Amino acid sequence: MEKAVMGLRGLIYTKFKSANAFAEFIGWTNQKVSYYMTGKRIPSLKDVWLMADALNVPFMDVAKFFLTEESPDGD
C-alpha cells in the first residue's frame, strides 16, 4: 500500500497545492482523501474515475496504485 500512498500523493501534488485543495475541487471531505492517500481505504471504481478525471490523467494511472499482485483468496 506504500506504493499507493506515494504515487497518489505525487499525482495530487502535481496539479494541486495540497490534498485539501484536491478534496475541495473534487467535492470530497479532507478525511476521505486522507484515507485514500494513507492507504487506510481502497477507493471504489467510481472514486478512481473521479480522481483520474480531477487529475486529468488516464484511469489506470490512478487505479494502478491500488492494484495488488495477489488475489483476494490468496491464489
Image: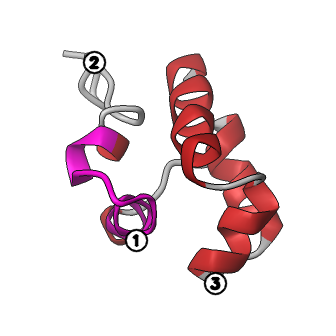
Kind of residue at badge 1: Leu
Left or right, 44 with reference to 32: left
| Residue 31 located within the stretch drawn in magenta | no
Q: Nearer the viewer, mark 2 or mark 3?
A: 3
Q: CA distance from mark 1 to mark 2?
A: 25 Å
Left or right, 34 with reference to 2: right
Residue annotated with mark 2: 70
Packing grade of label 2 (10 A; few <14, some 14-19, many >=20) is few
Q: Main secondary structure of the magenta part?
A: helix
Left or right, 57 with reference to 23: left
Q: Secondary structure at mark 3?
A: loop
Residue 40 makes an appearance in the image? no
Q: Which mark is residue 50?
A: 1
Residue drawn 66% across and 64% down?
Answer: 22
Residue annotated with mark 3: 27
| Residue 59 located within the stretch drawn in magenta | yes
Residue 27 makes an appearance in the image? yes
Q: Please, is residue 62 above or below residue 75 in the view? A: below
Kind of residue at badge 3: Gly
Which quadrant is the C terminus positioned in? top left
What is the span of residues highlighted in magenta in the rendered image?
47-61
Mark 2 vs 3, N-terminal side: 3
Kind of residue at badge 2: Glu
Q: Secondary structure at mark 1?
A: helix
Mark 3 vs 1, N-terminal side: 3
Packing grade of label 1 (10 A; few <14, some 14-19, many >=20) is some
